[in-house]
Image (spheres, rainbow, N blue to C red):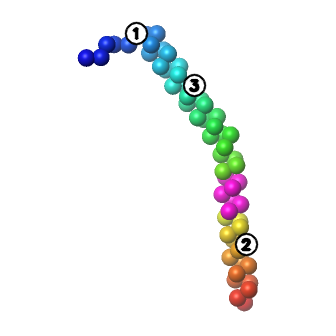
Amino acid sequence: MKPSLSHEQMTMIIARATRERNAAIGELFATLPSKVLDWAARGFEKLVETLRVDASRA
């Protein structure tokens, strides 16, 4: 049987989880714009390549 946690231990666990969550959110906001731009650039390159191939066939 597990011993029950003290109030201080629960507070420490909650504080650590909050810090980890905040770090993950910060990382998301730091990396999301570049990921979106990379995705948009790849899509644009595919579109340009498709138009280029279609133009050469005409």
Mark 3: amino acid: Arg
User: Label 3 belongs to which residue?
Assistant: 19
Q: Is residue 44 left or right of residue 9?
A: right
Indicate yes or no whether the magenta region holds residue 14.
Answer: no
Q: Is residue 20 left or right of residue 54?
A: left
All told, the count of numbered labels is 3
Earlier-in-chain disc, 2 versus 3: 3
Q: Residue at x 31, y 13 (%)?
A: 3
Tell me where the magenta segment starts and ends, as one range: 36-42
Mark 2: amino acid: Val
Spatial CA distance of label 1 from label 3 is 20 Å
Q: How many residues crowd around disc 3 within 10 Å: few (fewer than 14), some, or many (20 or more)?
A: few
- Magenta segment, principal secondary structure? helix
What secondary structure is marked by label 2?
helix
Vertical position of residue 24 compared to residue 31: above or below: above
Q: How many residues crowd around disc 2 within 10 Å: few (fewer than 14), some, or many (20 or more)?
A: few
Residue 26, horizontal then vertical, whole percent: 64, 34
Residue 2, horizontal then vertical, whole percent: 30, 17
User: Label 1 belongs to which residue?
Assistant: 6
Quadrant where the C terminus lies? bottom right
What secondary structure is marked by label 3?
helix
User: Label 2 belongs to which residue?
Assistant: 48
